[in-house]
Amino acid sequence: MIVYPTGGGTGLIGMWKAFGELIAGGWLEGPPPRMYAVQAEGCAPVVQAFGQGQPSALPGRAPHGGRGPAGAGSARGSPHALGVA
């Protein structure tokens, strides 16, 4: 099980692709681990879109009006991340 704090979903896409390649190349056997995306309350566009069954997420804002990491809440990779969820 992997719990991954995601901003726009691009890291989650990379992990999903990497595990597929590791399995295809014979480096890992069996199914890939379960992956869970987590986001800060108040800035969770990917988590909200998943919960609402949407194909992509709208950009979010940093929680409580503060600044978050670059790309946090950008939802740039959400269509792909939600597509493999």
Image (spheres, rainbow, N blue to C red):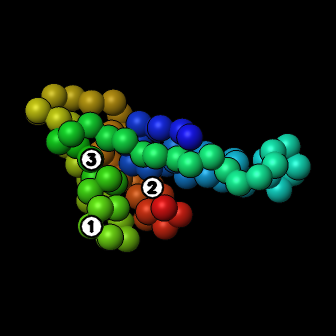
Whether tag 3 and tag 2 are in contact, CB under 8 A, the answer is: no
* Foreground of the two, 83 or 69: 83
- Using the rendered view, name the quadrant where residue 38 is placed: top left
Residue at position x 61%, y 52% in the image: 16
Mark toward the viewer: 3 or 1: 1
- Could you say which disc has been placed on residue 81 in the image? none
Please tell me the numbered disc located at residue 44.
3
Residue of label 1: 52
Q: Residues within 10 Å of mark 3 (few under 14, many from 20)?
A: many
> Does 5 sit above or below residue 75?
above
* Residue at position x 27%, y 53% in the image: 45
Mark positioned earlier in the residue sequence (3 or 2): 3
Q: Amino acid at mark 3?
A: Ala
* 15 relative to 25 in the view: left or right: left
Q: Which mark is residue 77?
A: 2
Mark 3 / mark 1, whichever is N-terminal: 3
**Three-letter amino acid code of the residue under disc 2:** Gly
SS at badge 1: loop
Q: Which of labels 2 and 1 is toward the front?
A: 1
Q: Gap between marks 3 and 2, in whole Å?
A: 13 Å
**Neighbourhood count class around disc 2 (C-alpha, 10 Å): few under 14, some 14–19, many 20 upward:** some
Residue placed at 37% from the left, 71% from the top?
Answer: 55
Query: Which is nearer the eye, 9 or 2?
Result: 2
